Image (cartoon, helix red, strand yellow):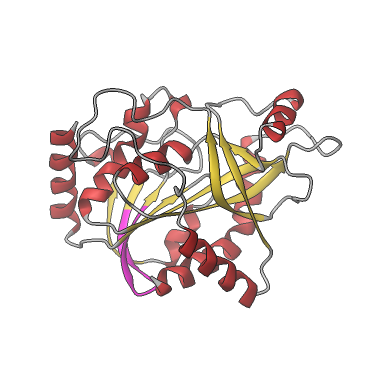
Amino acid sequence: MLDQIKSTSAFVLEKAGIQPELGIILGTGLGGLAKEIDVKCIIDYNEIPEFPVSTVEGHFGKLIFGVLGGKNVVAMQGRFHFYEGYSIQQVTFPVRVIKFLGIKHLFVSNASGGVNPDFEIGDLMIINDHINLIPNPLIGKNNPELGPRFPDMSKAYDKNIIKKAIEIASKHSIKVHQGVYCATTGPTFETPAEYKYFRVIGSDAVGMSTAPEVVVAHHMGIPVFAISIITDLGVPGKIVEVSHEDVQSVAAAAEKKMTLIMKELIQTL
């Protein structure tokens, strides 16, 4: 895998002509943050050797290089999911590639279902921990050049960055929660019993991504900040039938708040 990572990152760097300081992964319905980037280069995923291709609506499948918040960034406008049929190593391969491009921090966003009864649709939740129910991407032979065999996960989400994000949100009177994100395989939305189970085991929100990406980033020593937009509720009495289009619509409506926080947060790093 290491040879593939190095050859892919070398290809991308040569084509982009810009070395990023920070990586961003944009989730379902959240590709609009790319409009805030002073774009220098865009590379379609299907041009990149060894890269998977996004198959989900709302994931545009582009690697965007440019400037945001005064920093050189690379944004993944669309991610990959285990439910698409990719191996978990393929799902997280792009994270390893952008590490080798030179990023020092990783920002991750997603759309998720809220199981905390205090949440409302459209709320933002800063992730401070996770429960990963998707296969662990570190299963298999470990290469010490990528990271340790048994990485500690007690500080997977950077507390200093979280503190800054909360201060920025407060300054702009944006309500944010902190909470635990539960990652499941999907692609089905959850049953009422599953929502109840996720709450019982300590989750505040549930989705189909993010945790494997964070595991790999942390394995390689990249500080991570992650945020969810609550697009539906898995709370008794508030559960309604949900479609992917509903999720995209709510995410797009709340995206401006998330974009403001991320843009100012990047300026502080």
Q: In this view, does 145 lie above or below 75?
A: above
The furthest residue to the right? 237
Where is residue 16 drawn, in percent x and y? 20, 57
Q: Main secondary structure of the magenta part?
A: strand
- Residue drawn at x 60%, y 64% is 257
Quarter occupied by residue 14: bottom left
Indicate the position of residue 81 as horizontal and vertical percent values.
44, 32
Tell me which corner region of the image, top left, top right, bottom left or bottom right, holds residue 238: top right
> Going by the image, does 36 lie left or right of 116?
left
Q: Which of 268 and 221 is in front in this view?
A: 221
Q: Is residue 170 left or right of residue 84?
A: right
Asked whether 72 falls inside the magenta stretch, the response is: yes
Q: Which residue is drawn at 76% across and 27% down?
A: 192
Residue 39: x percent and y percent? Answer: 32, 65
Q: Which residues are drawn in magenta?
A: 64-75
x and y percentages locating residue 204 in the rendered image: 67, 43
User: Residue at coordinates 59% horizontally, 67% vertically from top-left?
Assistant: 166
Q: How many labels does the image show?
A: 0
